[in-house]
């Protein structure tokens, strides 16, 4: 047997270990892709109209592109119409120059009650039949920001804005059995609470997490539960942690990209992957007496699972009532 010097053996062993590690990482990534799930249906959505808030970017953009590819009509409810039209141009290019369905950009700023009222008035005038409303738009910020009505934005945009949006459309949504999709997050299970003492206020919690964001995602789930109890065709979901521009407010440094890129590649979904849960909720999800928002079920990885959070009816009803009161108080000041 030939003698192999240790100077050669060690580098070869190191290379073998590195190759094995890379192979394991790739296999883990493939496992996650399979676990995350994918919407396999591609039946036509021609003749069905969807409203998608925040449709020009991130998960909203990917959801819009997937549905319009299937011939749906999409009302792109966006804060900035210039960016909405830019997104349409980008989408047309990505779809090969033609858009199978129809895209209708409309202005909607969920941080302004006036904008929400204007949007719903125009929507009811121009869209007589609504198949699905996707409450996708949301944000997470590090520094204090407030809506036009002076509510901190996690409460004001992520919860109260969509609360008013649905309320103004409730007659149409109920009569037409319109799907109402609520984009929550599994973060509702982690360090989240409905802090009624500070509802709508900016609070600095002693936590490494954005507690205000987590709280707003819990509000989304509680809100979906109350909608379901009131007869709405509601579906709540978690898209998963996705690599989109959602965290643009955090202004990461160049070295963050260097350090976290491998973690991002391994652990985070693409916007297209995260959108699968929204697409499923908007087109296929079915609730039952056993599996629905009231019993704690939501869509994750393109299937129903039960939340680990213990919901209680007193908080559920109180949040609804406090939301109605917050809207009324803001309107008195106008």
Image (spheres, rainbow, N blue to C red):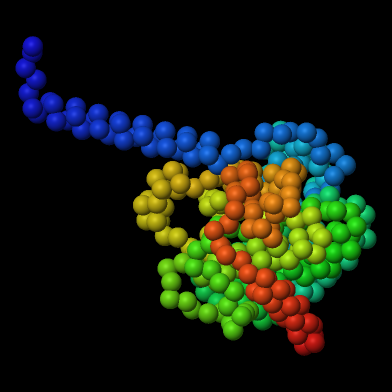
In this rendering, the answer to whether 168 lies above or below 50 is below
The image quadrant where one finds the C terminus is bottom right
Residue furthest to the top in view is 1
**Tally of numbered tags:** 0
Regarding residue 88, the answer to whether it shows in the image is no
Left or right, 30 with respect to 101, comes to left
Left or right, 303 with respect to 52, comes to left
Give the x, y percent position of residue 238. 60, 53
Give the x, y percent position of residue 186. 55, 57
Front residue of this view, candidates 308 and 270: 308
Give the x, y percent position of residue 331. 79, 83
Front residue of this view, candidates 282 and 97: 282
State the image quarter where residue 152 is shown. bottom right
Regarding residue 199, the answer to whether it shows in the image is yes
Give the x, y percent position of residue 37. 58, 39
Left or right, 50 with respect to 183, comes to right
Which residue is found at the position 19% from the left and 29% from the top? 13
Which residue is found at the position 86% from the left and 59% from the top? 174
Which residue is found at the position 50% from the left and 63% from the top? 190
């Amino acid at each position: 047997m030939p003698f192999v010097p240790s100077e050669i053996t060690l580098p070869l062993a190191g290379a073998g270990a590195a190759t094995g590690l890379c192979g394991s990482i790739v296999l883990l990534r493939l496992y996650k892709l399979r676990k995350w799930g994918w919407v396999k249906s591609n039946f036509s959505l021609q003749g069905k109209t969807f409203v998608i808030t925040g449709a020009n970017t991130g998960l909203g953009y990917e959801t819009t592109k997937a549905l319009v590819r299937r011939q749906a009509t999409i009302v792109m409810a966006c804060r900035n119409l210039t960016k909405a039209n830019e997104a349409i141009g980008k989408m047309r290019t990505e779809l090969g120059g033609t858009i199978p369905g129809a895209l209708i950009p409309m202005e909607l700023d969920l941080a302004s009650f006036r904008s929400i009222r204007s949007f719903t008035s125009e929507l009811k005038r121009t869209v007589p039949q609504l198949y699905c409303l996707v409450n996708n738009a949301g944000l997470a910020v590090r520094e204090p920001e407030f809506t036009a009505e002076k509510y901190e934005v996690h409460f004001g945009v992520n919860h109260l804005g969509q609360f008013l949006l649905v309320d103004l459309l409730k007659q149409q949504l109920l009569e037409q059995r319109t799907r109402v999709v609520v984009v929550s997050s599994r973060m509702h299970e982690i360090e989240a609470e409905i802090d009624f003492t500070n509802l709508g206020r900016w609070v600095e919690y002693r936590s490494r997490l954005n507690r205000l964001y987590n709280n707003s995602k819990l509000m989304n789930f509680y809100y979906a539960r109350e909608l379901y109890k009131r007869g709405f065709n509601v579906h709540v979901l978690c898209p998963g942690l996705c690599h989109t521009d959602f965290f643009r407010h955090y202004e990461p440094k160049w070295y963050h990209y260097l350090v976290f890129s491998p973690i991002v590649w391994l652990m985070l979904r693409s916007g297209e992957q995260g959108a699968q849960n929204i697409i499923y909720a908007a087109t296929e999800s079915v609730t039952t007496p056993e599996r629905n928002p009231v019993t704690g079920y939501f869509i994750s990885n393109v299937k129903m699972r039960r939340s680990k959070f213990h919901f209680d009816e007193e908080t559920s009803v109180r949040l609804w009532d406090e939301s109605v009161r917050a809207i009324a108080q803001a309107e008195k000041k106008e």
